[in-house]
Amino acid sequence: MTIETVDYTTKIPNNVNLVEDRQVLRALESWHPGYIDWWKDMGPEGFQEALVYLRTAVSVDPKGWAKFDYVKMPDYRWGILLAPKEEDRKIPFGRHFGEPAWQEVPGEYRAMLRRLVVIQGDTEPASVEQQRHLGKTAPSLYDMRNVFQVNVEEGRHLWAMVYILQKYFGRDGREEAAELLQRRSGDADKPRMLGAFNEATPDWLSFHMFTFFTDRDGKMQLESLAQSGFDPLSRTCRFMLTEEAHHMFVGETGVGRTIQRTCEAMKEAGIEDPMEIDKVRALGVIDLPTMQKKLNLHYSLSLDLFGSEVSTNAANTFSASLKGRFQETKIADDHRLDNATYPVLKLVDGEIKRVDEPALTAINMRLRDDYTADCQRGLDRWNKIIDRIGVGFKFELPHVGFHRNIGEFKDAHVSPAGVLIDEATWAREHSKWLPSKDDGAFIGSLMTPVTEPGKFAGWIAPPRVGIDNKPGDFEYVKIAA
Ligand code: BYC
Ligand code: FE
Ligand code: FE
């Protein structure tokens, strides 16, 4: 058997030869029932018996790794899939630059590495919990299938981190694996670890914004961990990234189709001014300014996930060769950053200024800048949709200081345009920039389920092509009676 193919003879599909790794297989098998209980409790509510047209990984070869079939979600074959081992891989950054990649955890970095793996692992089930109510208001069977696909893959990402914990961290790894099933998104006593993963996902526009902005943080973090000197982490993240691409596709096209529908409806009704919110809403579509507010919210929540702009944690994980930069191997520098600097946006004497900081402590800032550029490219594609239909409106990313809870700007008020404002101005103006209760209620009023094959709710355009090239009226989900 080549490393690309997945062994489906064990209870847990894998390409890491679990059959011969008895101890880890047993640890995973004893974790499995708790996972299934968690999935049934906290996974998609009301659809555990439905037959869903899902893709399952059957190999890790980037070409044709998936097969599609109807599956009941609790029967999905969650597995352990690592990208193939690169022969003679060398550590691409940090103090250990140029040394052979580690196949075992270096003792001195054990705690640091475990923390990174646990935080990564914690976000995966959190997102499933956040999205568990969405099936009931899906705008089509196509969209319903997409959220379920994202959910089972986030479940698999949890498996990916649990494998690392159980194989390489012994007893405390097993304890962390158990705790990953105990924390709950939004729970006052045992919340998930990072801010954005305790927020609600109340409607489908939020879901699509989340998969665009927050799964894109996932992409950036996984890219950095894929550079890791700890080779098993690198390999597992490389395969996770192939799945991540679909999550961002769901977000980008979901918002894109919402924009398209709104602009088309405005054209048909002869509404020229996007600011005529009541008239637009009367058409049963989401006005563009409200979409901008949702964008402001999800972008700012996602920026918090990069941690502080200036961070010794980040410097330490980089120097320890555990977590690199985006596309580390393509950067032309010494990959150690002993004397380099990087410009960081800071609050200095009541002004927002760019200040050169040691590049090592500015690692989070740099990743966040790469993230912002990636988001902007997505916005440019959304703006093209608006342009093509001929509506005068443009989405913009708010300033990075806007609505922040972590880092340099957490105690300041900054407008989306990047102007520092006082408390009173913020209190007066913020409902123009962030979704208000009324905005939420309006969007909520559109969230009526559509479950007839080939039909779509009136606020969202159909996709251009089906999943797995299926025709428009394909029954992506067979809902149990
Ligand atoms: N919320 O030096 P600092 C994904 C804590 S998403 C709460 O500023 P650092 C996905 C921090 O833990 C990707 N706490 O930051 C997407 C620390 O606490 P302790 C997830 C926060 O450590 C969609 C203190 O503040 N993966 O995969 O350099 C669906 C000072 O920390 C937050 C990762 O994040 C926050 N937002 O960077 C499904 C990769 N930010 O330790 C999945 C692993 C910071 O002093 N994690 N804090 O008690 C990391 O690389 C880093 O831990 C972080 C923070 C980038 C998160
Ligand atoms: Fe994930
Ligand atoms: Fe994801």
Image (tube, rainbow, N blue to C red):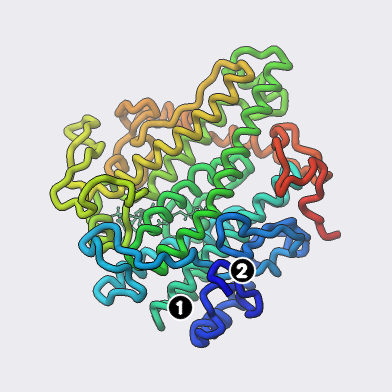
- Seen in the picture, residue 374 relative to 56 is either above or below; the reply is above
For residue 441, side relative to residue 72 (left or right): left
- Seen in the picture, residue 455 relative to 196 is either above or below; the reply is above
Question: Measuring 61% from the left and 76% from the top, which residue is drawn there?
Answer: 12
For residue 124, side relative to residue 134 (left or right): left
Q: Considering the numbered disc 1 on the image, is that residue within a helix, a strand or a loop?
A: helix
Question: Measuring 64% from the left and 36% from the top, which residue is drawn there?
Answer: 443
Quarter of the rendered image showing ligand 1: bottom left
**Quadrant assignment, res 348:** top left
Question: Measuring 57% from the left and 48% from the top, which residue is drawn there?
Answer: 201
| Tag of residue 78 | 2
In the rendered picture of this protein, how many numbered marks are placed on residues?
Answer: 2
Q: Is mark 2 within 8 Å of ligand 2?
A: no
Farthest residue in the left direction?
A: 339
Q: Quadrant of the N terminus?
A: bottom right
**Quadrant assignment, res 255:** top right
